[in-house]
Amino acid sequence: MSDPLVVPAKADPVSDPVVRLSRVTRSFEQGGVRIDVLRGVDLAVQPGEIVALLGPSGSGKSTMLQAIGLLEGGFGGKIEIAGIDASNLGKDARAAVRRDHIGFVYQFHHLLPDFNAIENVVLPQLITGRERAECETRARDLLTALGLGQRLEHRPSKLSGGEQQRVAVARALANKPRLVLADEPTGNLDEATADTVFAQFLELVRGQGSAALVATHNERLAAAMDRVVRLRDGVLV
Ligand SMILES: Nc1ncnc2c1ncn2[C@@H]1O[C@H](COP(=O)(O)OP(=O)(O)OP(=O)(O)O)[C@@H](O)[C@H]1O
């Protein structure tokens, strides 16, 4: 008989890794040839930890971020997000995990062209069911912290590349996700702008206690993060 005083161990969202990959694989078919891009990737990112993901072009950094972001199925092995085993979830359940736990920043911002800066940052918050006024305050605060206090009502086409990327950062952080995934977040900016935007990104991520996994080619940016992992021949070294 089981002892009623023994409580079974369960997932602890505070201390469990925000993301844990166990033997993750991903292959593609190209012209009848199979390419094994990820060949058994193991990784655990702790709450609040900021990890740089380096690797040569074509090594699979974007593929790995897409797998962790649950943007598509098709990978082998196990991916856990905030203690949830996401390996076999359907499309809707994956979308719910993304909405509740993950923010994305891409190399090209993917802002909605017909909406201004505030609206681009408000929209992902409305999806979670929060009040519009609260969402607008959060958007205004984030954009102001990123130096866009005078650009709140501008549409993306009226913003510089660096300003657009700051809006994309604000959008990714708007819901205070436990995990931020960034794919070359400053890759299309000149060096000085990239440094400024990245420093602001790190400060905000640290300030709100999110973990982050940042794919980059830039060793200097990588050195500013807590840990560096490298993708080579389909595994992390
Ligand atoms: N949908 C797909 N179909 C076929 N092959 C793909 C697909 N997506 C990625 N690949 C291949 O997988 C490999 C890894 O690509 P990926 O974009 O993940 O690399 P990366 O490390 O992010 O590169 P970069 O630093 O240049 O952005 C490449 O050889 C690419 O051609």
Image: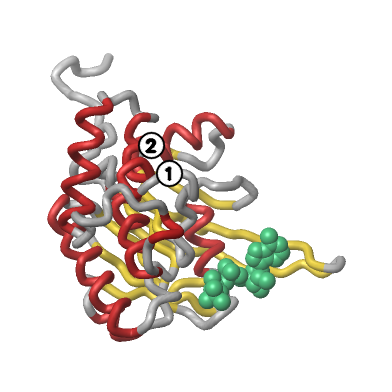
**At 86% from the left edge and 66% from the top edge, which residue is drawn?**
32
- Amino acid at dot 2: Leu
Residue wearing tag 2: 123
Query: Contact (CB < 8 A) between labels 2 and 1?
Result: yes
Residue 223 position (above or below residue 73): below
Q: Tell me which amino acid carries mark 1.
A: Phe
- The answer to whether the residue bearing label 2 lies less than 8 angstroms from the nearest atom of ligand 1 is no
Q: Residue at x 58, y 34 (%)?
A: 91
Label at residue 115: 1
Q: Is residue 151 shown left or right of residue 144?
A: right
Residue 129, by quadrant, is top left
Mark 2 vs 1, N-terminal side: 1
In the image, is the residue at mark 1 within 8 Å of ligand 1 by its beta carbon?
Answer: no
Quadrant position of the C terminus in the picture = bottom left
The x, y position of residue 224, in whole percent, is 22, 77
Residue found at x 39% / y 77%: 189
Residue sitting nearer the eye, 226 or 9: 226
Residue 180 location, x and y as percent? Answer: 33, 54
In the displayed structure, 210 sits above or below 228; it is above
Location of the N terminus by quadrant is top left
Q: Nearer the viewer, residue 103 or 89?
A: 103
